[in-house]
Each structure stands twice: as C-alpha cells, then as structure tokens.
Image: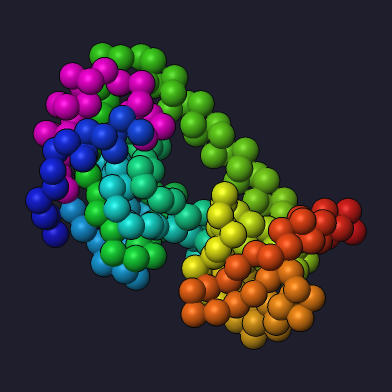
Amino acid sequence: MADKIDLSSVEAALAKAELMAALSEATLKRLAKQGQPCTVDSGKLLFAKGDKGDALYVLLEGEVEVRVSTEAGKDVRMASLKPPALIGEMAVLDGGTRSADICAIRKSRFLRIHRDQAIAALESEPKALLKLIAEMSRRLRHADSALEDAHTLDLGGRLALRLIEEAGDSTSVTLTQTELARRIGASREKVNRKLHEWVDEGWISMGRAGIKLVARDKLKALIQESRAG
C-alpha cells in the first residue's frame, strides 16, 4: 500500500543507510524520486523467504525482524532492524530469492527501490558497492556470533545478552516478555521466572514502562560465566 513520504526525509534516510551513504547527493536524490513508498502493518510480512529478490528497501520508520522457520514450523528470530536500515541487499547483487522472512514488529514505512535502479546507481559509483560488501561482511560476522551464542549460552546468558543489546546506551527495554522469549528461543514462562529472579537480586526492575537495567555489570558477568561454562 503506497503512501506519501516527504522526499527530503527519504534522502536523509538514504544518506544514513550503510550502502547509500557512499552515493553522491545527486544519485541519492534520483533514487529517492525513483523509489516507491510502502507501509507494512505490525505482524505482516514485507516479504517471505523464497520470494523473488527484485528490489531492496530502506526502512524509514518502525522496526522489522529477520526470521526463518524451522522444519517444525517454529519461527526463529535472526535479527531486528531499525531506521535507517537497508533491507534485501543481496537481491541487488544476484537477483535471487529471499533467504529469510522480513516481518514488521510494529507498523513500518519503507522506500522500495527496484533492483535495476540500484544496480545503475552502484555501477555509476563503485565506492558504494564496496560499502555494501563491507556491510554484508559485518552482518555475516554478527550472524556467526549470534549462532555461536545460541549454542553456547544458557537461557540466562541469552536473556541477559538480549536485554543489554536492546537497551543500547540507555537502561530501558520496552520489549514485552513474549517478544523477549521469541527472540531468544525460549518460553515466556521461563523468561518470566528468570526476570523475577533478577528483580529479587536487584539486577533489574520491571514496571509499566518496561524493564530497567539496574546492575548492567551483573548481567555482563553472567554472560561471561555462561560462555566460559
């Protein structure tokens, strides 16, 4: 579903995206005009694994998660992306099928850029292509690290790591317990018990605003202990 988006905000978002930041201002303006805005409601897919990779997307507002399904039909979260993330870069390189589902965690707005338009921009400015390769390498390393953590960390370690990553530079996490459970591959009941253990320990506090990290150092130490074990 298309909606109106201010071109200046689109250009600003493109300039911040990992790949697009290397493009000239003139090329950014051209892509902003060529791109098609679209909106995806919370819980809906932007695209599914196996779909044709005929475009890339710039996330302008909202948040999405990258996920795959197991043979048992369980959704496994691989990563979450926030503005101004670039989504579907591999389609630019090979035009193949999508390797994962992209689902909107909350209502999200995008700029859809057709593969032919992106290829033309990259061919005219090779530095942007090198930027894309560097970004994809970074994501591969991150995915490798996440996979290793999934196999080596226990539930407490995975939960502590997720809380610290979601909080970033702040001390607050607004994800629900259900969202946290899905992101670390555990049941909500187990996550709830562990969180209340940490409340009793004085490591975190919980309220209507979400979860507040009171003793970040304790959570970090727990992660290290889990990895060492």
Task: Report the residue at 79% width, 61% height from top.
Answer: 218
> Left or right: where does residue 71 sit relative to residue 55?
right
Task: Report the residue at 34% width, 70% height from top.
Answer: 43
Above or below: residue 172 compared with residue 55: below
Q: Quick check: is 36 in the magenta stretch?
A: yes
Quarter of the view holding residue 19: top left
Quarter of the view holding residue 8: top left
In the image shown, does 207 or 33 lie closer to the viewer? 207
Above or below: residue 189 compared with residue 95: below
Q: Which residues are magenta?
A: 17-37
Q: Is residue 227 visible?
A: no
Residue 109 percent coordinates (x, y) = 24, 54
In the image shown, does 117 or 174 lie closer to the viewer? 174
Q: Looking at the magenta stretch, what is its main secondary structure?
A: helix
Residue 114 percent coordinates (x, y) = 21, 37
In the image shown, does 80 or 216 lie closer to the viewer? 216
Q: Is residue 180 visible?
A: yes
Residue 51 percent coordinates (x, y) = 32, 53
Quarter of the view holding residue 159: bottom right
